Image: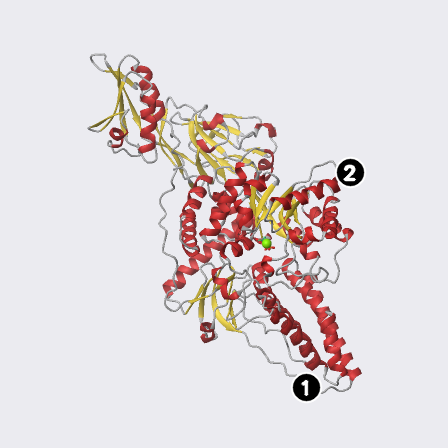
Amino acid sequence: MALIITSPLRGWAAPLDSVPDPVFAQRMMGDGVAIQPLADTVCAPFDGEVVTLHEAGHAVSLRSDEGAEVLIHIGLDTVGLKGRGFTPLVAPGATVARGDPLIRFDMDAVALGATSLITPVIVTNAEAFTITRRTMGRAIGAHEELMALAPARTQPRRWSDDGTVIEERVTLILPHGIHARPAARLGECARQFEAEIHLLHGDKRGDARSTVGLLALGTRLGDELVVQARGSDAEAALAAIVALLGSDMGEGAPAHAPAIAVPAAPVLQPGQIGGVIASPGLAMGPAVRLRQTAIAVEREGKGVDAERTALDAARTEVRVRIGARADAAGGSVAAVMRAHLALLDDPELAAGAETRIAAGNSAGYAWRGAVHDQIAALKATGNAHLIERTDDLVDIERQVLGVLTGIPAEADAIAAGAILVADDLLPSQLVSIAASKPAGICLVRGGPTSHVAILCAGMGLPALVAMGDAIEAIEDGTALLLDAEAGHVTPDPSQADADAFAARLAKREARRDAARAAAGNACQTADGVRIELFANLGTVEDAKAAAAQGAEGSGLVRSEFLFLDREDAPSEDEQHAAYQGIADALPGKPVIVRLLDVGGDKPAAYIPFDAEENPALGLRGIRVGLAHRDLLETQIRAILRVQPVGQCRIMLPMVASVSEIRAVREVVERLRGEMGIETPIEVGVMVETPAAAITADLLAAEADFLSIGTNDLTQYVLAMDRGNPAVASGVDAMHPAVLRMIAETCRRATAKGRWVGVCGGLASDPAAVPILIGLGATELSTVPGFVPEAKAIVRSVTLADARDHAERALHCSSAAEVRALARAFEEKNA
Ligand code: PEP
Ligand code: MG
């Protein structure tokens, strides 16, 4: 009867070959399965006795009542921890029942001190037991079957009566039987001997040197075979073939993951309304329409002084309100609020209003006129990204007019759990509505890079924008299923659809909760490959939030937050204080500061930009720094001053040529010399242009690392403006063309020994994480709130599965097909 060994831990069951330690991978101690732990308590895998418990507490061996001996070794190189982080719960000699806790360990402490947390579970008396079944390549719960053992035969070898043929029985442990690859390896092994060797399966007989003969045996996992050898070296030949059949032959992790059918690209079902994903997620709830009150203003003023005083007072009141919001919030809300404060004090707006008041107009009329002048100026640029910023102007227009007229400018509170449906939404309205805890947002208009979109993403609020007039017809109270992963909303769903959606949502939430609970744990794939999980930051508040979410560093500090929305460039001291603050919030962790990335969609008032016909193809990114050396040098000096030296690395935006990294490296080295800094400073490049992707090998020869900015890379690969709502639905970084660029970058750079990360928005897309790892990225930098989930996704996949999945994605014909593939992968892994 089979002896069942249950998993001593919850985690991911992986083949021993994936353990990065030859002692286990080469089965020097015996055969078994490895577990990448997702829990901290090792339990007894059967009823039996504790034989040894190492004094360092990291390994325990047990003997089952049937005599099978099993060693459980927690992590690699953990003996060196000398017991730190391990709490033995039993003593040698103890009798245990299956599931009894044996050792508890501190996952954080052990992960930090060990090479890997991967935990081999080894059958050490293989001469007495054969593993007939094993669980590998999937998540496993504690107490689920990990292996099945059968007692080895007492007289395994038998000579034929005439003494010419020796034979031995084996139980096949290959997960897919003897298919082409194992057959080839058996043939290779057999050819090293003189002896004739045959495998017998039932009444079929195949020559071990013949691949076809072996395939024709039609074997499957668990089949009983007889291996026969005849000839001068028959004993040695038999032993070699039996030993090979007793191993996984590298089949533990199937080279090709079980086929995942690529579902057809999602098409809208009747009644569904499509939209552009501004903030991913799922939500269900009743529709609530936003009621906007129009604010009318008198034209005639009541005297210049009175109107001036009224406007000043209204602006002061709004300033205090926005300032309080900025202080109370953090991250993106605070950043948007600060941008609004800057607009409120914009001198052009003040001058425009003053002129109108001086001409006898009311404060409200003057303010509205001044704001509309600015909106007209932005619209005249034709730059879609700037046009999206007009929402911010309308926002402060309404807030000031609200104070002047006494008409509430902010949106009314809505019922918690409702889905807000609106023509458009202003940032301040979103912030006030967010307090009522809506479940999601659907907008007729709006763009995916608007402040509302950024705020929704920061709040984790699912949102679809640019949905068009179709959602105008949705009435208050209509039940909605908002799928901001596939990009559509279903009004009035059937009960079955609603139930299925609710189940999906509940699963998602449970996973998110579990991810949050494990946010502080180290990040590696299920088979122990380390993936660094960093966060993208703009401010010290972001850095604090990121640290709290388990970020292991910052892969992108968008330093332009210091440079935008102001009249002059920040001084070296001001910059240094900001970078130091961020570094201090992430003690001991790498902080990658991106050099000033302005130009294009991010103009800075004090840098003279000539009018450009194609700003996205003009003076932007590192080109600006190289054209304004004073700005570049000031920034690099501020970064080099951060203590401890070396914590901050430097990254160049929008690189197109090797000469750019050479030029910046030369500045860094010169300043380092001038400042007497001996520690080398890492300098890396962003891959945001097709040029950088296709020359990643050349850049890798000069740069310490490469980080892919998928936002810009997507717009340049697809020739679609990332800020233009008209093409927004096509700007999807999951497009196979973009994925192929990422693959090419990883291939070329890693061949030169440089790591590649991803700091663009794609890294924050749960569907993309396995693909990016599979393509070769070893660092992901995401929005801070996504760090725990990204870590959980990384932990749930093996590198082999991720590679296979990524390879399939590269061969899809559209982004929609890649997304369908990703959904199937996620469901299979769930
Ligand atoms: C990118 O382009 O992907 C990126 C990270 O830079 P930004 O979005 O700031 O342009
Ligand atoms: Mg960019």
The quadrant holding residue 225 is top left
Q: Which residue is mark 2?
A: 676
* Left or right placement of residue 266 versus residue 522 in this view: left
Rounded to the nearest whole Å, what is the CA distance between mark 2 and mark 1?
Answer: 65 Å
Specify the quarter for ligand 2.
Answer: bottom right
* For residue 324, above or below residue 289: above
Q: Earlier in the sequence, mark 2 or mark 1?
A: 1
Q: Position of residue 11 (x, y in %)?
A: 47, 40
Which color scheme does this rendered protein use? secondary structure
Q: Position of residue 498 (x, y in %)?
A: 40, 63
Quarter of the figure with the N terminus: top left
Q: Which residue is mark 1?
A: 298
Q: Camera-side residue: 66 or 582?
A: 582
Q: Position of residue 239 (x, y in %)?
A: 34, 19
Q: Residue at x 62, y 39 (%)?
A: 702
Which secondary structure, mark 1? loop
* Left or right placement of residue 620 versus residue 479 in this view: right
Question: Between tags 2 and 1, which lies in front?
Answer: 2
- Identity, as a three-letter code, of the amino acid under mark 1: Glu
The quadrant holding residue 321 is bottom right
